[in-house]
Amino acid sequence: MKEEIYVSFIEYNNWNMFLAATEKGLCYLSSQVNTVNDAQMQLKKYLQNFTIQESDSKTILYKKQLIEYLEGKRRQFDIPLDLYGTPFQQLVWKSLLEIPYGETTTYQDIGNKIGKTTAVRAIGNAIGKNPLLIVIPCHRVIRKNGDLGGFREGLDLKRTLLELERKVNNSSQ
């Protein structure tokens, strides 16, 4: 039986995002998907047997919280997630959820936290496969020398997200 994936697009200020959710929760978020065909191709990387249905009503909660984040009004998400990944990927993604808003950590720190101190490359690969950028804040992970490292959606977006969080933190102090 095919799983129903509900998709929607957010166009807010200069932000254009695509999101996908199942009945269980948000499962994919991207700034690089512009059409339902693009969505189909991206989602095939994570899911095998699904059908897509455009639905603003099934995605309204996710859109609301993402817009609140982009406005600087939300620092944490409290939405259900439906993650598809290996146990190792899910372990890494769970550790990303613990990085405080506006702060950064390193790939090595993630390795230390999950007890995989020599798995920095595997950690980087798992972070690169994070299907929920922003919500699972992979943009907060940098190299130990301070360089930004990589980002599935491009370094410009990573810089923009880090700057957004810095500005919000600075304005609230």
Image (cartoon, helix red, strand yellow):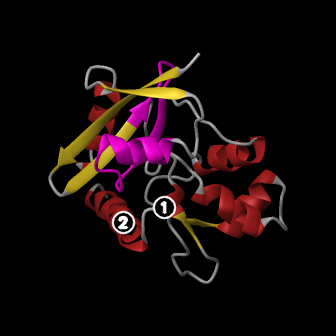
**Residue density around tag 2, few if under 14, some if 14–19, many if 20 or more, within 10 Å:** some
Q: Give percent across and percent down for residue 42.
A: 47, 48
Q: Give percent across and percent down for residue 171.
A: 25, 60
- Is 130 in front, or is 45? 45
Q: Is residue 170 above or below residue 95?
A: below
Viewed as shown, does residue 146 lie left or right of 29? right
Residue 38 falls within the magenta-colored stretch = yes
Q: How many marks?
A: 2
Which quarter shows the N terminus? top right
Viewed as shown, does residue 13 lie left or right of 40? left
Which label was assigned to residue 139? 1
Q: Quadrant location of residue 128?
A: bottom right
Which amino acid type is shown beneath numbered disc 2? Leu
Q: Give percent across and percent down for residue 69.
A: 31, 46
Q: Secondary structure at mark 1?
A: helix
Which amino acid type is shown beneath numbered disc 1? His
**Who's the residue at 37% across and 39% down the image?**
19
Q: Is residue 74 visible?
A: no
Q: Is residue 43 above or below residue 166?
A: above
Residue 10 falls within the magenta-colored stretch = no
**Who's the residue at 72% across and 45% down the image?**
91
| Discs 1, 2 touching: Cβ within 8 Å | yes
Viewed as shown, does residue 162 lie left or right of 120? left
* Magenta span of residues: 20-43
- Is 162 in front, or is 91? 91
- Which residue is the site of mark 2? 157
Which quarter shows the C terminus? bottom left
